[in-house]
Amino acid sequence: MKVYIANAFSLNMLPAGSKYYQVNVNEISVDEVEVTLKNDFEVVSCVGHADTANLFSKLLDYPVAFNRVPVKLEARDMLFVGQVNGRLPEGCTELPEGVTITWYLVTLS
């Protein structure tokens, strides 16, 4: 099992080979993300924007790397997605007024 942290979910993250997947998406709190990240899991960042990775690091009090890599989820993996609602200005280090982040847990079954 792997734990991923991302700023988006893509259908390209589904594993190859089968034609049917049940994708489970649950909105969760930032506290739930923090607790999971601080457990003894292998955590892989797939955050594709440096400023977003830096902001996630600060908000989660956990090092989130800028890491634009392809991801293929497996049945037991957990993908935490921080969905930015609004526009982050270039170089931002704080969440700007009017911009929020909604956290989701994406799993496959």
Image (cartoon, grey):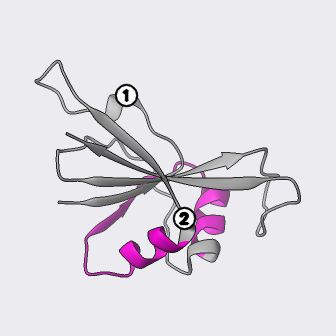
Membership of 41 in magenta stretch = yes
Image: magenta residue range: 31-57
Residue, x 18% and y 52% (percent of image)? Answer: 76
Specify the label residue 54 is tagged with.
none
Q: Is residue 7 left or right of residue 80?
A: right
Residue, x 51% and y 42% (percent of image)? Answer: 8
Mark 1 surroundings within 10 Å by alpha-carbon count, few (fewer than 14), some (14 through 19), many (20 or more)? few
Q: Is residue 25 left or right of residue 15?
A: right
Where residue 67 sits: x, y (%)?
A: 45, 55
Residue ID for mark 1? 11
Q: Residue furthest left?
A: 17
Residue type, numbered disc 1 = Leu
Q: In which quarter of the image is residue 103?
A: bottom right
Give the structural element (helix, strand or loop) at label 2.
loop
Mark 2 vs mark 1, CA separation in Å: 23 Å
Seen from the viewer's position, the closer of residues 23 and 41 is 23
Residue, x 31% and y 35% (percent of image)? Answer: 23
Q: How many labels does the image show?
A: 2
Residue, x 84% and y 60% (percent of image)? Answer: 96
Q: Is residue 21 above or below residue 95?
A: above
Residue type, numbered disc 2 = Ser
Q: In this view, does 16 lie to the left or right of 71?
A: left
Residue ID for mark 2? 29
Mark 2 surroundings within 10 Å by alpha-carbon count, few (fewer than 14), some (14 through 19), many (20 or more)? few
